[in-house]
Image (cartoon, helix red, strand yellow):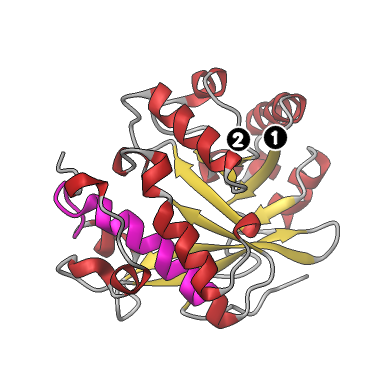
Amino acid sequence: MQKPPDFAELSCQQCAKACDLGFEFSMAFQPIIDWAHKRVFAYEALARGPEGQGAGWVFAQVNEDNRYRFDQSCRVKAIQLAAKLGIESYLSINFMPNAVYRPELCIRTTLAAAEKYGFNKKRIIFEFTENEQIIDKQHLRNIVEHYLEQGFLTAIDDFGSGYNGLELLTHLSTNFVKLDMSLIRNIDQDKKRQIIVRQSVNMLQELDMFVIAEGIETAEERDTLLKLGVNLFQGYYFAKPAFEALPDISWN
């Protein structure tokens, strides 16, 4: 894995222009809904191609040589666009743990971007996905702890799928856990999923973690999850991601 020379700090201007990655990309935004208060709790920034191509197209361009710069560019571009769109809720940004070499140095560009674009760093949530295999869990723990010390919030994405599962919770504590859509799909018709999610929610609440259910596509899924103790939702039922814009939200 290629490291940036001397962990050199990338400028906000460089990262906003994609740091000479060899390809261009931008962001779409999808809301995370606080249903009890009928408000947008956060917007997740999702990587998209320059003409709105999906995340698959973007990540097909990422390799060992540009992974670090891509991770840094995602952070800056998300903050830049969020400030431009006037987002006042939390902003959720995905990061790649295997692209973070030394958190105290790699976070500098993010801090600089937040200051430059006038976005409160305490409104930033960093998500990492279970679907990226974490070789060094102590390294991940160091990242999460340092981000918390800096005033950021953190989240485990896609919980219930991928490499780590429950074992990951023994190594670190994040502010949020996002339940994978594989647990959510048709949960209103599936007693096994209901039992798994109910127990997961109880466990995570005891660990002082807030639960977000992602992949909601029907009112029945939402209503079942409400009964199971979940109140933060994300999914097409509420809004699809909007390219470089804030989507209209369904509150039905």
Looking at the rendered structure, the secondary structure element under dot 1 is: loop
Which residue is found at the position 28% from the left and 71% from the top?
Answer: 14
81 relative position to 122: left or right: left
Q: Are marks 2 and 1 in contact (CB under 8 Å)?
A: yes
Query: Where residue 211 sits: x, y (%)?
Result: 68, 41
Q: Residue furthest right?
A: 37
Looking at the rendered structure, the secondary structure element under dot 2 is: loop
Which residue is at the front of the view, 5 or 129? 5
Query: Where residue 87 sits: x, y (%)?
Result: 63, 74
Which residue is at the front of the view, 106 or 20? 106
Q: Which residue is mark 2?
A: 174
Q: Which residue is mark 1?
A: 209
Highlighted magenta segment, given as a residue range: 61-82
**Predominant secondary structure in magenta?**
helix
Disc 1 crowd, CA 10 A, few/some/many (<14, 14-19, 20+)? some
Q: Quadrant of residue 82?
A: bottom right
Which residue is at the front of the view, 93 or 234? 93
